[in-house]
Amino acid sequence: MFISMAVDFWRSRALGRIAAKYDSQALEADALHFSTDIWSTGVVVLGLFLVMLGRRYGVGWLRAADPIAALFVAGVVVYVSSRLARKTIDALLDAAPAGVRGNIFAAVRRVDGLLEVDRIRIRRAGNRYFADLSIGLARNVTFQRSEQVVGAVTAAVHGVLPDADVVVHSVPRPAQRENIFDRVRGVATRHNLNVHDVSIQDLRGRLHVEQHLELDEQLTLKEAHDRVTLLESEIRDEVPEISSILTHIESEPATIEPGNEITRDFKLEQKLKSIVAEFSEVLDVHEVETKRVRGRLYVSCHCTFSDNLPLSRVHDVQTELEIRFKQAAPELFRVLIHPEPSTDNRR
């Protein structure tokens, strides 16, 4: 019997290692079976030893050790069988290990950019886990950023279940602290439209919105206006505080325009630099270039600003410069100014 216990111990250990390596429930059950044999045999040996002592020393009550040992063996069998039955039922019902869902929830919640975790479903088929998650993201998040967050969530799940097959479903949600600007852009994003230069003014307690909207240049004016009308109506429904909306419709370029080679017009460059000198915020202007596209004159330049200058003021200066440039040179069709911080423009 001792030899049998030693063999069962060796077989149980070997099967346990292989079961853990390949995540096999069948081998795990077999290892549990051999470990049960070890305990059962040990209890039987103890019972026989006590019976032998009772006969040798005349202790009558020790003669009952054998049936008592049989009861202990039955108890061990019942206990191990219940454990095995519970594991088998969990496997048939695709149940996940206890605590795994909570660990996954905690790991996923640490992902940056996540608003909420709507649902986590985990099941097991064979030796592999499958995780299905539904997460909430800000509705103004780009598709590329959404993919990055989904990748981070998948990595977080793999940190808990390394070999799991993970499916993540992202759902757009309004952020808790979403301002009016984000709400307006959120409605536009829902229609896959791009609005920019959104400006909101408070005119005697009434909010007035001005925005620029880019639409396909192949659309007719009637088609474009109908889309804008629908967009403005939905914005008013979702943001009732807004009293009126004015939308500037722009054509979204979809063709590459032929143009002449970029050149330098020294006379025009000196005229523009004299205007720039009137703005104390502009530290330097360089790389002034001109080009003609479809017979129209384009000019571009780089302007250096202080590192700490607020972006709103930079934008105001750019707008004023564009206006002054076109006043000084009416032949200009478009002006593009690229702002640079002083630390990136040291010569």
Image: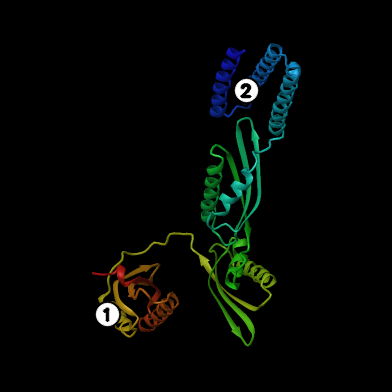
Locate residue 143 relative to residue 98 in the image: left or right: left
Q: Position of residue 272 (x, y in %)?
A: 31, 80
In the picture shown, does residue 285 fall above or below 328?
above
Residue at screen point 38% across, 70% down:
295
Residue at screen point 33% across, 85% down:
278
- Which image quadrant for residue 109? bottom right
Between circles 1 and 2, the one closer to the viewer is 2
Q: Position of residue 289 (x, y in %)?
A: 31, 70
Name the residue tied to disc 2: 35
Q: Position of residue 229 (x, y in %)?
A: 65, 70
Q: Image quadrant for the N terminus?
A: top right
- The three-letter amino acid code for the residue at tag 2 is Ser
Q: How many dots with numbers?
A: 2
In the picture shown, does residue 38 fall above or below 347?
above
Locate residue 28 relative to residue 21 in the image: left or right: right
- Which image quadrant for residue 49? top right
